[in-house]
Amino acid sequence: MYAIVRAGGRQEKVAEGDVLTVDKLDAEVGSTVTFPALLVVDGANVVSKQADLASYEVTAEILGAVKGPKIHIMHYRNKTGYKRRMGHRQPYTEVKITGIKAGK
């Protein structure tokens, strides 16, 4: 069984036990979050209607905060002596999917 969920502005394919990296969430390590399901596939059974998906719940446990790769930024203007170097590392949250179930 797997599901397509919306996590941080992106769509991710998840199954129970998967660890994925999403945009930073404001929650404590060890707490539980839920993601809205957009599609649920259970063998040959595919659920895609909004009314049916409202009963499905994808839960995840927060493992911790991580950072993305370093991005190097260089600003340069010709003939003026203007050069600036900057870097950026995007903050992310690592979560582990604990369950996909038809709840309500």
Image (spheres, rainbow, N blue to C red):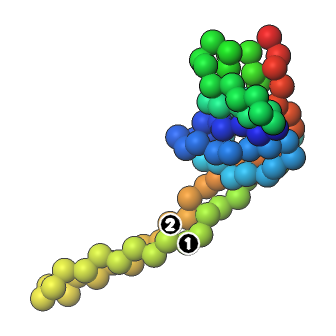
Name the disc covering residue 70, or none. Answer: 1
- Residue 39 spot, x, y in % from top left: 65, 31
Location of residue 103 (image quadrant): top right
The amino acid marked with disc number 2 is: His
Mark 1 crowd level (few <14, some 14–19, many ≥20, 10 Å Cα): few
Marks 1 and 2, Cα distance to the nearest angstrom?
A: 6 Å
- Element under disc 1: loop
- Residue 54 spot, x, y in % from top left: 68, 16
Q: Is any atom of residue 55 visible in this view?
A: yes
Please name whichever residue, 101 or 65, is drawn nearer the observer in this view of the structure.
Answer: 101
The amino acid marked with disc number 1 is: Lys
Quarter occupied by the N terminus: top right
Q: Are marks 1 and 2 in contact (CB under 8 Å)?
A: yes
- In this rendering, position of residue 25 left or right of residue 89: right
Quarter occupied by the C terminus: top right
Q: Which residue is mark 2?
A: 88
Please name whichever residue, 90 or 12, is drawn nearer the observer in this view of the structure.
Answer: 12
Residue at x-position 58% and y-position 42%? 11
- Element under disc 2: strand
Residue at x-position 64% and y-position 53%? 92
**Looking at the image, which residue sits at the far front?**
44
